[in-house]
Image (cartoon, rainbow, N blue to C red):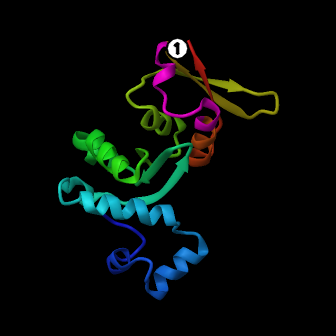
Amino acid sequence: MKTTLCSICLTNYPLVCVNCQEKIDSGEISELDVRVIRVLINLEKNFSSLKDITFVRAIQANGLIIVLVSRGDSRRLRPALRKIQRLAGGELDTTLRIVEESRNPQHILRDLIRPVRILGVNTIWLPDNSFERKVRISSRDQSRIPLDIRRLEEIVYELSGERIRIAFD
């Protein structure tokens, strides 16, 4: 797996080199990032597809860890994605979701709520000439979504920079 930390520092953490210490001090890498990277590197032995991905960052939200990987990487993990998420989440004692980095909020939301399906996306134009997207999800699937709806909307905004509103039909 490709990360911003060097492999020697990952194995010897919290003893790290000067370059990695600067990344930690600047906030580029967090304690959560290091924990998640170490767990995923341990899983590389069983899942060779993890060797080809690039770790971007990890976010923790209400008992859920969201792992952001580079574009195209989630397709490489697709055959074993659920198993990797379950095993890594088990080691971290939480639920884990692997999400592909994207500016499209629909792609991010799809990865976060999988296997729940998105019924449709509408664009709502606001009076100030801005817009937000209304994402429609079946009301039967509401209980299967892992996060609070407002928190989910905030996470999608943080990752994509675009506002969404989730509605159940």
Q: Is residue 76 left or right of residue 96?
A: left
Instruction: Return the residue nearer the eye: 129 or 87.
Output: 87
Residue shown at the point (43%, 83%) measured from the top left:
15
Instruction: Report x, y in % for residue 98.
Output: 39, 46
Instruction: Report x, y in % for residue 112.
Output: 46, 37
Q: Main secondary structure of the magenta part?
A: helix
Q: Is residue 30 left or right of residue 55?
A: right
Instruction: Report x, y in % for residue 77.
Output: 27, 46
Instruction: Return the residue nearer the eye: 40 or 153.
Output: 40
Task: Work out which residue is located at the far front of the displayed protein and give it.
Answer: 93
Instruction: Return the residue nearer the eye: 105 or 50.
Output: 50
The residue carrying pointer 1 sits among few (fewer than 14), some (14 to 19) or many (20 or more) residues within 10 Å by Cα, namely few
Instruction: State which region is magenta.
Output: 140-152
Q: Secondary structure at mark 1?
A: helix
At label 1, the amino acid type is Ser
Instruction: Report x, y in % for residue 161.
Output: 62, 46
User: Which residue is tagged 1?
Assistant: 139
Q: Is residue 72 visible?
A: no
Q: Is residue 140 left or right of residue 50?
A: right
Task: Work out which residue is located at the far bottom of the displayed protein and give it.
Answer: 18
Query: Height in image: 132 above or below 103?
Result: above
Which image quarter holds the N terminus?
bottom left
- Give the image quarter of residue 83: top left
Residue shown at the point (22%, 53%) measured from the top left:
49
Query: Height in image: 111 above or below 25?
Result: above
- Give the image quarter of residue 113: top left
Task: Work out which residue is located at the far right of the displayed protein and give it.
Answer: 128
